[in-house]
Image (cartoon, rainbow, N blue to C red):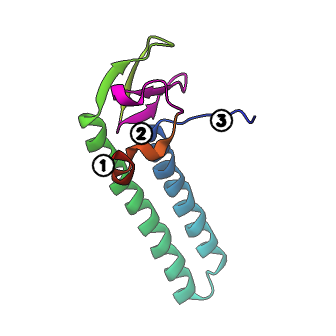
Amino acid sequence: MADITYKNKINRIRTFALALVFIGFVIMYVGLIFKDIEWLMLIFMVLGTLSIVFSTVVYFWIGLLSTRAVQIICPNCEKPTKMLGRVDACMHCKEPLTLDKSLEGKEFDESYNSKRKRR
């Protein structure tokens, strides 16, 4: 059986936003290759800027979600972690966590957070 590592939702979204920043820089650097074709360079610069602006929006959004997340103490590593949804993973040790008593003892599945699975 394959070893499955679970990731915390907040950290996953923050990593995505950070990747958008670097992708935006790379897109703008590609635009510098086309210095002689001004309209093409402008398109790459605008796309890179939009990527960085979108990452700022994602960072702001996850910051708002993080303030509303439930803060708990992980039973495994005993460090405070924030939890989004019915199931999540510890930010530090990646231990699967749930606050829903009906899910205790069941196999960890992120689909428990979807509204369809709750029924």
Q: Earlier in the sequence, mark 2 or mark 1?
A: 2
In the image, is residue 23 part of the stretch drawn in magenta? no
Q: Is residue 36 left or right of residue 71?
A: right
Question: What span is colored magenta in the figure?
Answer: 84-107
Q: Which residue is mark 3?
A: 4
Label number found at residue 10: 2
Please, what is the dominant secondary structure of the magenta stretch? loop
Label number found at residue 9: none
How far across and down, in percent of the image, does residue 70 sit? 28, 29
Q: Amino acid at mark 2?
A: Ile
In the image, is residue 95 part of the stretch drawn in magenta? yes
Q: Nearer the viewer, residue 37 or 82?
A: 82
Q: Which residue is mark 1?
A: 60
Examine the image and state in which quarter residue 98 appears.
Answer: top left
- Tell me: residue 4, above or below residue 113: above
Q: Nearer the viewer, residue 40 or 107?
A: 107
